[in-house]
Image: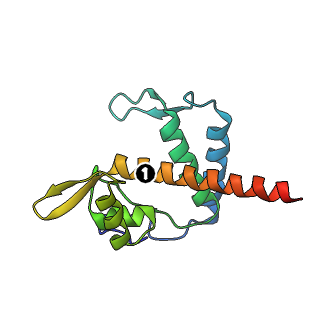
Amino acid sequence: MTLPASALPFGNRLPSADDRQIANQLRRILAAQKAGEATLRVPDPETKRPLEITLTPAVSDLFLELLRHIGSGDAVTLVPIQQMLTTQQAADLLNVSRPYLIKLIERGDIPHSTVGRHRRLKAEDVFAYKVARDKARSDALDELVANDADLY
C-alpha cells in the first residue's frame, strides 16, 4: 500500500524492549476487559483529579491491534482515512490497481461521486465493498473445501 503524505510515523523508530514490554502488559489488561467495558483512568490536566474514560469496542479493538504490533517490535505508521477518498486511495485500501478500481466503479460495484473531473468514493462504501468481497471469497473457499471433502 502506498502511504499518503498525511501518514504519520509513530516515533520514527522501532519499539524498544521497554516499549514492547509496556505494550504487551497494557494489551493483556485491555484484552481481559469485557467488550465496551474497558476503562482508562487518566489525570485531568486542569483539575488533576482522575478522569475515567470508557472505551467503545471499536476503539478498544484499535488499541489492541496497535499494542499487538508494538509488542511484537513492529514499527507503526498511523494513516488517517478521510471520509472521501481518491481512486488511488481506495485502490490502495482494497489492494487493487487503480484501473481495476475504475472498472468496479463503472460496473456499479462501488458508488462514487464526481468532483469536477475527479471521482471520489466514500470511505464507508469502500469498506462495505471490502467486507462483501471478503465474505464472498470466504464463502467460495468454504464451498471448495466442502466439495473437496465430498470427493474422499
Q: Residues within 10 Å of mark 1 (few under 14, many from 20)?
A: some
Q: In the image, what residue occupies the spot 58% across and 47% down?
A: 64
> Dot 1 lies on which element?
helix
Quadrant housing the C terminus: bottom right
Q: Position of residue 104 (x, y in %)?
A: 36, 61
Up the image or down, 143 lies above or below 46; here it is below
Q: Nearer the viewer, residue 33 or 91?
A: 91
Farthest-out residue, front: 151
* Residue 19 figure quarter: bottom right
Q: In the image, what residue occupies the spot 49% across and 32% down?
A: 56
- Res. 7 visible in picture: no
Q: Nearer the viewer, residue 33 or 104?
A: 104
Please state if 51 lies on the left or on the right of 145 as rendered: left
Q: In the image, what residue occupies the spot 49% across and 49% down?
A: 132
Quadrant housing the N terminus: bottom left
Q: Amino acid at mark 1?
A: Tyr
Q: Which residue is mark 1?
A: 129
